[in-house]
Image (cartoon, coloured by chain):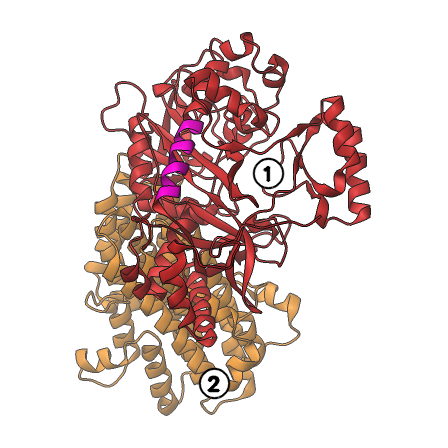
Amino acid sequence: MLSRTADHLYWLARYTERAENLARLLDVSYQMSLLPQSIASQNENWRAILALNSLEDAFAEVYDEVNVENVLHFMVSDPANPSSIQSCLRAARENAHAVRGTLTAEMWESVNATWLELRQQQFDHILARGISEFFDWVKLRSALIRGVTFGTMLRDDALHFIRLGGLLERGDNTARILDMQYHVLRQNGDEAATDFYRWSALLRSVSAFQVYRKVYSEAITPARVAELLILRMDMPRSLHACADGIVRMLQLIANSVSAETERQAGVLHARLHFARIDDVLAGGLHAYLSDFMDRIYDLGDGISRDFLVAA
Amino acid sequence: MTVNFYNEMVDAEGNLRSHYRAFADWLASMPTERLARKRAEADTAFHRVGITFAVYGEEAGTERLIPFDIIPRIIPAGEWQALQAGLWQRVTALNAFLNDIYHAQEILRAGFIPSEQVLRNPQFRPEMIGVDVPSGIYAHVAGVDIVRAGGGDSYVLEDNLRVPSGVSYMIEDRKMMMRLFPELFSRHKIAPVQHYPDMLLENLRTVAPKGVGDPTVVLLTPGAYNSAYFEHTFLAQQMGVELVEGRDLFVRDDTVYMRTTQGPQRVDVIYRRLDDDFLDPLAFNKDSMLGVPGLLSAYRAGRVTLANAIGTGVADDKSIYPYVPEMIRFYLGETPLLNNVPTWILRRPDDLAYVLAHLPELVVKEVHGAGGYGMLVGPAASKSEIDDFRARILAAPDKYIAQPTLALSNCPTFVDAGIAPRHLDLRPFVLSGKGIGMVPGGLTRVALRAGSLVVNSSQGGGTKDTWVLESENA
């Protein structure tokens, strides 16, 4: 297929997945902010969200103060923030528009209708109706787009590039969410009672609360949560599952110059496949996740070079 | 001046024309609220599917719906057959003319058309002289605008031979009518139009360069901000061909390739929806970011087919239009079946004097303008607009032609005030390759403002489904 078409499909998937994960992250942060705590530590939490996306400076240009409402507005509806949910869904729609002939009619309509609906929602109304309802809507639209994609598209390279983009983004985003929450929890993780709520909120943010209960019989512990989200291959949002999918997609789209990118993906996958959570934690989770995100970034670079801007 | 308009549905005595009888019965039985509801349903569906066009001069990326009218324009079988024969004749002659002026130039040497009119025309492309194109076809897709005047006779208003658009609306309008009013399609025998993309693809495949067994066809678009982008994606998808932009293609050793995820892939036929000037920055507009460097060279070497060919603009130019009947007589030895609109050529002093004295009655058009931009409709213009145009004509008379204001026929149309007559035209699409063909009908454009004679979508025009009946009355 055309490299440019592949590029648009890949970014359509990345932006859609990013919007969904942003909704998940903001939702869990919002839920946590409702737990009893000092205003200072609450705002620390919101500051961490900005830091996670390297957006502190951009935020400071527009807002005086880091607080719930400002950060939510900035991350949900601000068109000036290229990483806001609105900007992501807009970018997804623009990428879809550029290749709408490659998409099935249902797919284009679900992406386009998502954008049209979003555009009609004022931030004030979103807040008034309850922000969680909005996050649920974003997750549902993303699920709808994914479902329509799987349910209607031919199993050819177009679909493979969409899946590749989605997996890469999801792996990165899960690592980010985990990194941030782990960090916050370690910082003020003294009261076991609120800890339970925090860990379960984190699990819920990646739809893993019930999964945890199913997989582990023991109480929620940080090590087990990390294991579930990093190493479990059967957990669809885990780093391992994402790496596994990336390797498979790369095999399907391989060309004459992509061997090195495939090798790197293979290495990443092997490191997750054969890892033990104790070793991961012993070396420091933050370092581990940072390394993972760097490798994902390099993979994105390689994919772009080998397939998307090919000569 | 009293003007008599031809009404497509009702004759001069107020009787229904027979081909509208069954439809009129149905329409009479429809409450206005139901029609309004159906129209709203159509608007929503068009928006959701994204059948929109971008408007030049407005904020970048502005997308608008082309208003769709739910009352169809109906053409009886016999009338269509006559029209089709005339269109085939005309497009055949236009292709012969293009082949001639880029080769032997016999029509010029025979003195039927003044040489300088052709050779000094900015649309004439000297790069094309002596270049042989497959089957001698230049205008693979022609969109010929037809209007019906007061007396009921049809006239050709323009031959669009460069990158005519609108065919996607023809197909989408039909789809919409079938969805909104399926019952109408069991009451009438309406010739189908949805196979147009298949015909187009087959036509493009027949003009592939010699020796290419299974040609790769692509559609070249200027990109997502072009006013007709929806149509480009629509046709590429319906034909199952890649929709490419200039940056997706490159030329090596006079061969055109597209950049794919599996490396370069050869391209044989380019259905291009990009004007000549932007095709190749090495040969034409060097600032073009939309074209493909080296494309002209590959084309001249016969390694790729462009549809339409480069240089077709010289045949649909408004200064050449008055000579089309001559072409038909010269190349085919036939009497023209379709009428030309009488045209004053303002480069001629007598014509200029007449036109300047009659501006309020006439339509004046820029020779190289298109899309309803840069024209004066005398009867609808204010005094200052006319004075302004007079000055523009005097400054460069050879840039303009003038025609009588045609009393464009009208057809009942569902507007805000209810059902009222509105003026319309018809753009049938003629496909030429190894053979010639078309789907019955075309795109009917309707001027939605009361009294307006300008049907262009950029000027507030809408569209109607066009029915060619397969038997005389129903």
User: How far apart are labels 1 and 2 at the CA level?
Assistant: 52 Å
In depth, the one of B57 and A266 nearer the eye is B57
Q: Quadrant of residue B438?
A: top left
Residue A209, compared with residue B198, is above or below; it is: below
**Residue behind mark 2:** A130
Residue B79 among those drawn in magenta: yes
Q: Is residue B271 left or right of residue B108?
A: left
Disc 2 secondary structure class = loop
Task: Indicate which disc residue B370 carries.
Answer: 1
Chain letter of disc 2?
Answer: A
Q: Colour of chain A?
A: orange
Q: What percent of the width, then of the height, locates residue A163?
A: 29, 56
Q: Are marks 1 and 2 in contact (CB under 8 Å)?
A: no
Magenta residues span: B78-91
Residue B356, compared with residue A244, is above or below; it is: above
Q: What percent of the width, then of the height, locates residue A156?
A: 23, 48
Amino acid, disc 2: Gly
Classify 10 Å Cα crowding around label 1: few (below 14), some (14-19), many (20 and above). some
Q: Is residue B59 left or right of residue B397?
A: left
Q: Quadrant of residue B239?
A: top left
Q: Quadrant of residue B301?
A: top left
Look at 28% across and 34% down and name the residue there.
B202
Residue A108 appearing in the image = no
Disc 1 secondary structure class = loop
Q: What percent of the width, then of the height, locates residue B325?
A: 51, 24
**Chain whose colour in the figure is red:** B
